[in-house]
Image (spheres, rainbow, N blue to C red):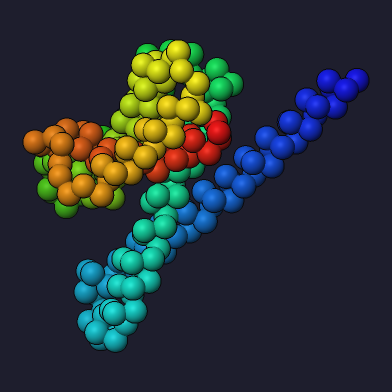
Amino acid sequence: MLSKMVQQKEAIKGRSKLFDIMIMRAVATIMVVAFHVYGVMYANHFPAMREKYYSMYYVLNQCILINIAMPLFIFVSGYLFIYLFQKQKYPTIGFLIKNKIKRLIIPYLFFGIIMMIYPNTLDIACLLSGTYAHLWFLPMLFWCFVLFYLLIIFFRNICLSHWCIIVLVVSFICSFYPYHYLPFPCMGLHYLEHWFCWFCMGGCVLCI
């Protein structure tokens, strides 16, 4: 009876945490939508409005919204990855890669090509670099999942909560270092140096 009560309590606690994560994801989504809605300021479709509100837009969008929304999105992705990993939803790295290619890389290529074809600006090299327009975060997230899984394999004999904190600190230090570790962009792999720390933080919050 006591064991059952403990399990029920843990289940309720787990659902509460997931609800919090869903709220965070919703907030991040609204912020990203707001950021791109105000993109007309850059496009200069309304010159008078741009002249009047540009400084306010810059502070709100470029300095606040996007600097909260993107880290929050990646944090949530890291949290959910560890949550699902602990529930054995990703039994092997091959399974993970196949799943994320289907959910991240294929949509990136599909919608990227559509977006390029419409204005007749098809650029396969740009697409394969993982840097195309608003879709750049999809291949970046793919590599976050793969790298974290590789770290889990590499440190499999060490408690997750122990090495995760060390990796988090190192990745944050790397994110402030103004240097690209890859000499050329490769399907978004070069973005890891700036964004992996947030993915790792999401994983650390759950496993600590």
Instruction: Please give the count of numbered marks on the rendered protein.
Output: 0
Q: In the rendering, at what x and y percent does residue 119 appear?
A: 16, 52
Q: In the rendering, at what x and y percent does residue 205 appear?
A: 53, 39
Where residue 108 sits, quadrant-wise, is top left
The residue depicted at 38 percent of the width and 27 percent of the height is: 148
Nearest the eye: 99 or 117: 99
Nearest the eye: 22 or 86: 86
The residue depicted at 29 percent of the width and 79 percent of the height is: 55
Q: In the rendering, at what x and y percent does residue 118 appear?
A: 20, 49
Q: On the rendered structure, is 3 left or right of 131?
A: right
Q: In the rendering, at what x and y percent does residue 180 appear?
A: 15, 41
Q: On the rendered structure, is 156 left or right of 120?
A: right
68 over 51 or under it: above or below: above
Residue 37 in sight here: no
Nearest the eye: 29 or 2: 2
Furthest toward the right, the residue is 1
183 over 85 or under it: above or below: below
User: Which quadrant, please, contains the C terminus?
Assistant: top right
The residue depicted at 56 percent of the width and 22 percent of the height is: 86
66 over 2 or under it: above or below: below
Nearest the eye: 89 or 13: 13
The residue depicted at 59 percent of the width and 21 percent of the height is: 87
68 over 85 or under it: above or below: below
User: Which quadrant, please, contains the N terminus?
Assistant: top right
